[in-house]
Image (cartoon, helix red, strand yellow):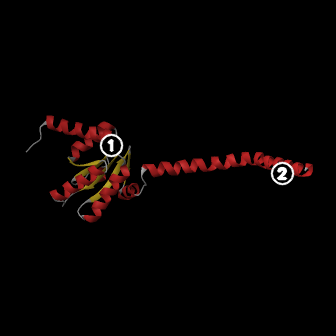
Amino acid sequence: MAISREQKEKMVADYVDKMSRSQAMILADYRGLTMSDLNELRQRLRETGGAFQVVKNSLFARALQEVGIPVPTESMQGPVAVGYCLGEAPPVAKALIDFAKEVEYLQIKGAIVGASFLGPEGVKGLADLPPREVLLAQLLGAVQGPMSNLVGVITAPLRELAQVLRARSEQGQEAAA
């Protein structure tokens, strides 16, 4: 059954909307997955702040062009489904990678992060990133460490002077007594 022009425009608008709300899009070949597999995958991705949608390649390519993202032609061949990272990207990537390990039919083709394309290995790297809170804590530690060392170096002479003055006053009190 043919899709009308109006339906195609709605589909492209839906793709563009999800792209604009997504931090990354992970492309996958879903051939061989059953409906129960797809439903389970969608549920897992919802829990991590993502969504999974089977797309029509030509319309998805048109939506990518509308947004200004180069179309990764090698990844747009065959049936394509997209995992949208509506929250943080690493948990969604990890959920997709884990599901692909469990169900051999799901093949990760790559990811679009910003305007750049990552291959399957890049998606695995994205999945291995620690959560945002951990990264922020590591950044804070990296910034805070040198600053506390600097404060220690600056206050050391004052601390030593105070210790010398206290020792001298104790000697003076002993001599007076």
**Residue 102, percent from left and from top:** 26, 65
The residue lying toward the viewer, choosing from 81 and 47, is: 47
Q: Residue at x 12, y 37 (%)?
A: 4
Residue under pointer 2: 167
Q: Which mark is residue 22?
A: 1
Q: Secondary structure at mark 2?
A: helix
Q: CA distance from mark 2 to mark 1?
A: 65 Å
Q: Residue at x 48, y 48 (%)?
A: 136
The residue lying toward the viewer, choosing from 135 and 19, is: 135
Q: Residue furthest left?
A: 1
Q: Which mark is residue 172?
A: none
**Residue 12, percent from left and from top:** 22, 38
Callout 2: 10 Å neighbours few (<14), some, many (20+)? Answer: few
The residue lying toward the viewer, choosing from 21 and 26, is: 21
Q: Secondary structure at mark 1?
A: loop
The amino acid marked with disc number 1 is: Ser
Question: Up-down: is 18 above or below 164?
Answer: above
Viewport quadrant of the N terminus? top left
The amino acid marked with disc number 2 is: Ala
